[in-house]
Amino acid sequence: MSASPSTPLLDVRDLKVRFATRRGAIEAVRGISFSVGRERVGIVGESGSGKSMTGRAILRLVRSPGSATAERLALEGMELQTLSERRMRAVRGQRIAMIMQDPKYSLNPVMRVGRQLVEALKVHERISSREATRRALTMLEEVQIRDPKRVFSAYPHELSGGMGQRVMIAMMLIPRPDLLIADEPTSALDVTVQLEVLKILDALVRERGMGLIFISHDLKLVSTFCDRVLVMYLGRIVEEIAADRLHEARHPYTRGLLNCLPEIGGSREPLPVLERDEAWA
Amino acid sequence: MTTVENTSKGGLGAWLKTDTPTSRFHARCISIWNAWADLSGNFLAMVGLAIIIALILMAIFAPWLATANPNIQHLGDRLQPPGWQGHLLGTDELGRDIWSRIVFGARVTLYIVGLVAVTAPVFGLIIGAVAGTIGGWTDRLLMRLTDIFLAFPRLILALAFVAALGPGIVNAVLAIALTAWPPYARVARAETLTVRRSDYIAAARLQGASTLRIIIGHIMPMCVSSLIIRVTLDMAGIILTAAGLGFLGLGAQPPLAEWGAMISTGRQYLLSHWWVATIPGLAILTVSLGFNLLGDGLRDVLDPRGNRQ
Amino acid sequence: MSAVPAEAPAAPTPKLSASNLQVVFGHGRQEVRAVRGISFNVRPEESFGLVGESGSGKSTVLRAICGLAPISGGSVSMDGTAIEGRRSKTFARRVQMVFQDPYGSLHPRHTVDRVLSEPLAIHRFADREERVVAALKDVGLDARFRFRLPHQLSGGQRQRIAIARALIVEPDVLLLDEPTSALDASIQAEVLNLLQRLRAEKKLTYLLVSHDLAVIDHMCDRLLVMQGGEAVEELDRAGLKDHAVASDYTRRLLTASEGYVR
């Protein structure tokens, strides 16, 4: 690890994302600050809380008419905002990777999965095609694909959602990034598959000592999976809390998110409804 | 309770910008206003709209704008260049004032465009929406019919119709409308097919809505915007086809001032007296351009697939 | 009829029942057997759940009941009378459906007002104005929403409108196809509460499809677990609570619904 222990992997200060619309500017993210080490951090909020925009802003992927500004947006002390687009592309591939909700839109539909993996490998390392093929197959095994040869020669549309997401994870981990941003990586998957994919992600992130930002609307899921949770509401972080101390959460919004899910064997009383107060943001 | 009175206190602007409309009429006004606000932000579309409005004004005020009677011949003043003795754009081979003929020709052009625009797309929409919604044999039959019409070159088919019906402006319009509907039927059907399987159509069906109600109330509104776009983009082609028929002597009959017919007669003098054919040509070009620009702008505003948030 | 629980000595005619229901799409080589013989009975004013993952055929069962998918074998009946062929207007007044995706189930160019008044026009109700206003109030929406277009509403508000549309013709059976799975967890609670309240107030019978056992458990008295178009097992709430399940698949679903455990 090159940087001194005091420099966090990712440091974000006063990040703002604005959208210019006909009716004036809308702030999707309104000045948030946080830092991520080599740990798992969850960002939780309802839709419209700005959680996904935060993930995109870190990678400088906010598209016009939106724009992101921050006092500081640094990866191991390197300011990302001033990098040229070319160098930023290198950062996106090699140091920060992102997994989206639906793998269907992230894989090239007309290229076999294997070839996409091999090409991704060859971009990052100078290796022969045969070596790349071998590596790609091991990687598919690493993400618990039982029949890697079949998946290797399949087209993305021939894979189920769970398989597709595993391939995405394998692909994103090729360059051994320092930080992985996962935006609702399992919400498009079946419940039983969700757990398997999370298990794979968990193991890989731990083994490689990567940092992970896990973006989700499901507080329970995030709390079982992450070390620390940031709760976002209307573009602000309303509470930051260690995942294992979530039951001690103070903020009514966090408590609301925690209690609103039905439970098996729970009472039939109406579910507690989330209170919302614009003054919190 | 909010009433129209107290919401309108903020002025018409606020009334149009609120996101809580208070009546059906209000809601409609707001959506029209929003579309207009989108469109007016597009400079080229506004240029196109200005051209079309100019054409309409020209047609309405033709008797006042024209400097001479478009059909009165002064054989002594034939083929005079633009600017000669008060003839703004010169005179043609019969000594008629070209500016006045252009101005009156705007009426003919508008008449053709208007008539085609209300017939062909409506017919196409009905055929396409019915074929797409009902499917099966109805679809196959209607679409093969459409294919047959599509297989002919448009001008040739129009020529055949005019030849059968006899020359004249009304018959020319009829012929153009008869040849112009198949693309609209195709567009409407394609749009219908994407909409047909959606949940909101299923919901309407579950509500007990009849097929007719679904076609008219649910499917057609989804096709209209792509048709409007298509029509504005096609307007240039329609004007040109009408001009083409006029040029071949099968459209407007002399002495009626029609831009295509003007080019047709002017072509004999093209080398020696360029303005006789060029000026109506420029008029056609300008109006076609106006429709195209507006069509492009409308596509940005109306296309339901566009990413409007 | 061996599995009828002892609590119902004289079992009433089921409100809705499917017996050996099969749904086949396409034919020849492209034949897909989406539902392969499913049977269940839903009692009047009961809430019955169908649980399964994607491809289990659970939504297809709902679509077959209301005529959006073909009944290729077996039968479906309501109050003891078989449902078949093209569904009539009377059927539409008695059975309504709420779809999964609130973004796809409302016509993008129809205002809320139009969405709600159209079924009233189809079924020739007289006092339409009052009914539209009442329907909005029923689902907890302000009258301000009446003339909005769907894109001016949030996901939760759209789903409320979809529920209002289904209930405006006063049906007695509501088919719910994953009504909350496209919504945030926090909005889901609101919609589930709304559905619970409406069921009690209007004495409705629910057939609820979901992939989420917790949601089914919260809403339903009995449930059927489905996988690959076939029934896995039928359970009641007590069984679910005690994990008294017979099949491995149900057990896996149960584990999954408890969240990720490291």
Image (cartoon, coloured by chain):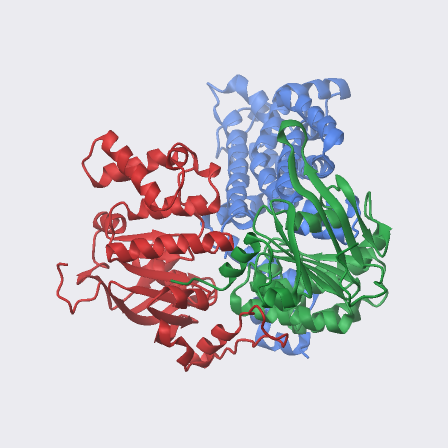
Residue B301 x %, y %? 53, 50
Q: Nearer the viewer, residue A8 or C73?
A: C73
Most foreground residue, B49 or C196: C196
Query: Horizontally, is B189 left or right of A106 in the view?
Result: right
The answer, for residue B174, to whether it is visible in the render is: yes
The chain painted blue is B
Locate residue C183, reporting x and y percent.
55, 62
Seen in the image, is B144 located left or right of residue A104? right
Total count of labels: 0
Is A281 left, or right, of C233 in this rendering?
left
Asked if residue B204 lies left or right of residue C149, the reply is right
The residue sitting at 36% across, 52% down in the picture is A200
Find residue B78 and report its horizontal and vertical position in percent: 56, 24
Q: In the picture, residue B260 is in which quadrant?
A: top right
What residue is shown at x 58% (from left), y 24% (from top)?
A: B76
Q: Note the chain letter of the green one.
A: C
Identity of the residue drawn at 81% across and 48% down? C87
Point 69% across, 67% down: residue: B23
**What is the display colour for chain A?**
red
Look at the image and tell me whether residue A249 can be seen: no
Q: Residue C45, percent across and down?
A: 77, 66
Q: Nearer the viewer, residue A261 or C51?
A: C51
Q: Is residue A93 above or below residue B124?
A: below
Above or below, B179 relative to C72:
above
Query: Could you say which is closer to the camera, residue B239 or residue A141?
Result: A141
Position of the N terminus of chain B, as image quadrant, is bottom right
